[in-house]
Amino acid sequence: AKEKGRNDFQIFNTDMKSVSINRLKLENELRKALAGNEFILFYQPQVDIETGRIVGVEALIRWNHPERGLVSPNQFIPFAEESGLIVPIGEWVLRAACKQNKAWQKEGYPMMPISVNLSMRQFFQHNLKGKIRHVLEQTGLEPQYLELEITESMTMDVDHAIQSLLELKELGVNVSIDDFGTGYSSLYYLKKFPIDKLKIDRSFVRDIMVDPNDAAIVATIIAMTHHLNLKVIAEGVETEEQLNFLHQNRCNEVQGYWFSPPVSATDLEYMLKHGM
Ligand code: C2E
Ligand code: CA
Ligand code: CA
Ligand code: CA
């Protein structure tokens, strides 16, 4: 993923000699973007497979660039991670997402958790718990309405990860493991992690109707989550056939283009009022 992220920067540089200059330029641009409020959040519904209702949303950042228009996170998040800018950007995301969810609650929309992606640097940041508690207090959002998504790679340092997760649990927020199945997390340790939910990676869901191995993997992950008393959501659901397979295999929730791509707050509000 790192390699891919790097190639994405080519929209910012075509000439290898200017790579470092362009990195500086991008870093400056990202700082300006933060200060100038050029980031926005889109929201993708998470749907209860039994009821078909929206039971959560994932907040996904976009960069509303003055010249380039909406820039996808794949084009700047990997760089933000390398440069450390992901920490202030991630804090902006966290605050904006909590604020938006609280605003929806006040406007009378159904209460539901908002999921926020945490980067590795944020997850292992000193005083993560204090920072999140501060944002919750500032925005007035109750902790059960915030869900943090970490990836499997962040659980490699098992002891450190368990310690960070326990702090988050003490706060009362939910934690899910994103892109599950793509990393190397040990099934042995999975039961030791105080987490709430697994998100089955899109790459497995994509091929469940064509690749019996992927179908078996997805069915197995779902069965395992039930045994471990975890919730499970499938990402990247694009077809009705995939949805039916996931339903038959008792997946709890689904997220994907079949229901909706990530949309603006206004579009999400429309869906909450009128259905998808
Ligand atoms: P992710 O966390 O795995 O998010 C899911 C990505 O899959 C989103 O891409 C979403 O638009 C896309 N997606 C959802 N449903 C479907 C589908 O049915 N088919 C296909 N083909 N794609 C689908 P997006 O918004 O471009 O985000 C890409 C990645 O950027 C995210 O992957 C996440 O790793 C990162 N990202 C986005 N926002 C943030 C953020 O606020 N903080 C951090 N640290 N990372 C973020
Ligand atoms: Ca995610
Ligand atoms: Ca994911
Ligand atoms: Ca991903």
Image (tube, grey):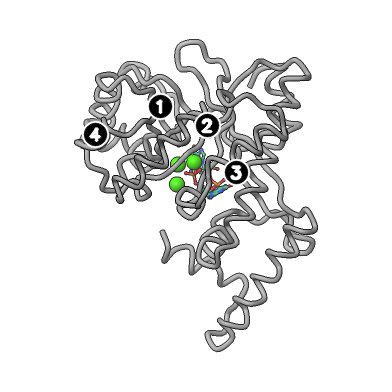
Give me the C-alpha separation between circle 3 and circle 1.
21 Å
Task: From the top left corner, tell me how far across and down residue 20 is, in percent.
Answer: 57, 82
Q: Secondary structure at mark 4?
A: helix
For mark 1, what is the residue?
196
Give me the C-alpha separation between circle 2 and circle 1.
9 Å
Q: Secondary structure at mark 3?
A: helix
User: Residue extending furthest bottom?
Assistant: 17
Q: Could you tell which of marks 4 and 1 lies nearer the N-terminus?
A: 1
Give me the C-alpha separation between circle 4 and circle 1.
20 Å
For mark 2, what is the residue?
147
Q: Secondary structure at mark 1?
A: loop
Nearest-to-viewer mark from 4 and 3: 3
Kind of residue sitting beneath label 1: Asp
Asked whether 267 or 79 is in front, the reply is 79
Quadrant holding the C terminus: top right
Q: Could you tell which of marks 4 and 3 lies nearer the N-terminus?
A: 3
Could you tell me which residue is drawn at 28 percent across and 31 percent down? 218
User: Residue extending furthest top?
Assistant: 51
